[in-house]
Amino acid sequence: MHHEIRDIVIIGAGPSGSIAAGYLEKQRASFLVLEKQKFPRFVVGESLIPRCMDNFSEAGFLEVLKAYGFQKKYGARFIRKNEIAEFDFSKKFGNGWNWTWQVPRADFDKVLTDNLKSRGVDIRFETEILSISRTGERWQILIKNNLGEETEITCNFIIDSSGNGRVLAKQFNLEAPPVIYDHSSIFTHIKETQRPEGIEGTQITFEVLDTKTWFWYIPFSNGVSSLGFVGPNTWFENFGNETAEAFKKMLKETDYYRNRFDQYPFKFEPISYRNISKNVKNVYGNGFALTGNSAEFLDPVFSSGVAFATESGLLASKLALKEIQGEPVDWEKEYSGYIKDGVDVFATYVKEWYSGKLQDIFFHTKPNTQIKAQICAVLAGYVWNKKNPFVRNHQKAITNLHHLIQMEKL
C-alpha cells in the first residue's frame, strides 16, 4: 500500500472543490483533490448568478471560462399566466458583476478541472474513499483508484466538497432537517434546432404553474436547453412513474411554454430527485469544513446553489490554509456565521416565494424602481451587502412590502 502526506485533502472536484483547489494552487499549498467520478459527467445546477464571478476570478478561472463561450446570463424572467417580471442584473443595487453564465455542467466542470490540471493540481478521478479516521490532529484517508490500487493519505485538514455524496455528513451523522420539506424535481435536456432569437432563446425563464410549482427553461450556447419542474412531492404523484411520459404530461401543464418543445426528443430519460433540500447540523468541525451541497442546499428557484458552493469553497480553503500556517481561526464566526448570514437571506426569499408573498411582489404591476433594484441585488447573489435593506432586514422588508401591496388592492 502507498502512503502519502498532504496538508489539505479536498473531496470532490465540482465547482466548490475546484474553487478551493484554484485558490490553494495560487498559494502553492500542499493539497490534492479526490473525485469519485470520471469527468465529464452530468450534474444539475446549470444557472449561475453574478456573485459566482467574484469567486471564479479570485481562484484564477475567469479567463478560461470566458474563452469557452458559455451562454451569458444578464438577468432572469418570471412568468405567471399573462404576467411577466424581469430582473436585469445591470440595474441591481450596489456594486458587483452584472452578468454570469448558463452552463451545461458536464462541460463547465471539466473546463475547471482541465485548467487545474494544467496548473499542476493533483486531481485523482475515479477514486473511491474506503475509510476516514482521525488520530490526534491528523486524518487518515484510505482510497482506492480505478485500477484497484489502495493508498493511505495523511492530512491535517479535509474540505468536503462532495456535493450530493455528502461524505462527512454521512460519516459523522451531521444530517439535519431541510429548510424546504417535501419538494422534488425532474429535468431533462433537448436540442433546439429552431430556437427563437433574442430573450426567448437566451434568457433563463421560470414559469409559475401554481404557488408551489414551477417550470424552468435554461438555454445554453450550444443549442441544448435544460427543462425542469420543481414542486411538492404530491404534485409529481399525479403523473405516474414512467418518467418520460410523465414529463410530457407535465409540459402540457405549462401555459407559456405549452407545445413549444413537442418536436424535440429528450436527450436522456428525465431524471427525478426527491426531497431536494438538504441541511446539516454543523458546517465545520475539528480539522474539517463542509462546502456547497455537502453542507446545505435550499432550492433551485433562485439558482443560488453554485454561488454558495463557490463562496464556501473559497472561504474554507482560505481559513484551512490560515489554520495550517498556525494562525488562529474562529470557524464559528469566520466560516459558519458568514455562510449562515447569506443562507438565511436566501432561505427567507425561498420560503416567501412558496408562501406566495414574493410572487405577489415580483408580479406587482407598478414596482418601485429602487426596491426592485434592491431585490435584484439579492437575486444576483450579493446577500452579504448589509447596506441593502432587503439583505439587512430581509424578512421584515418582504413582509412589509407585501402588506403594502395587499393594502393597495383594498
Image (cartoon, rainbow, N blue to C red):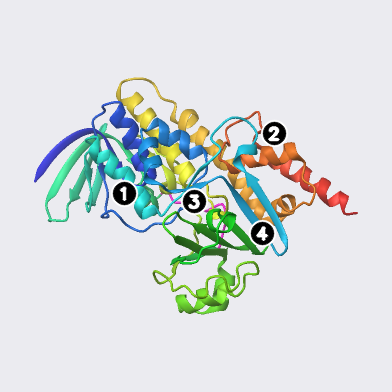
Residue 178 part of the magenta-drawn span: yes
Q: Position of residue 296 (x, y in %)?
A: 47, 48
Which residue is more in the foreground, 198 or 339? 198
Label 2 residue SS: helix
Q: Which residue lies furthest to the left in this view?
A: 1
**Quick check: marks 2 and 3 in contact, CB under 8 Å?**
no
Q: In this view, does 210 lie above or below 91?
A: below
- Location of residue 392 (image quadrant): top right
Q: Name the residue under label 4.
A: 79
Query: Which of the marked residues, 4 or 2, is nearer the chain's N terminus?
Result: 4
Label 2, label 1: how many angstroms apart (C-alpha)?
38 Å
Q: Which residue lies at the image location 59% right of the left edge and 75% below the top edge?
A: 252
Residue 242 part of the magenta-drawn span: no
Q: Name the residue under label 2.
A: 389
Q: Mark 1 points at which residue?
A: 110
Looking at the rendering, the stretch of residues picked out in magenta corresponds to 174-182
Query: Which of the marked residues, 2 or 3, is nearer the chain's N terminus?
Result: 3
Query: Which of the marked residues, 1 or 4, is nearer the chain's N terminus?
Result: 4
Query: Which of the marked residues, 2 or 1, is nearer the chain's N terminus?
Result: 1
Q: Which residue lies at the image location 64% right of the left edge and 52% below the top edge?
A: 351
Label 2, label 3: how many angstroms apart (C-alpha)?
26 Å
Label 3, label 4: how many angstroms apart (C-alpha)?
17 Å
Q: Nearer the viewer, mark 2 or mark 3?
A: 3
Q: Which residue lies at the image location 77% right of the left edge and 44% below the top edge?
A: 401
Total marks in image: 4
Q: Position of residue 110 (x, y in %)?
A: 31, 49
Instruction: Residue type at mark 4: give it.
Output: Ile
Q: Name the residue under label 3.
A: 47
Q: Is residue 85 left or right of residue 20?
A: right
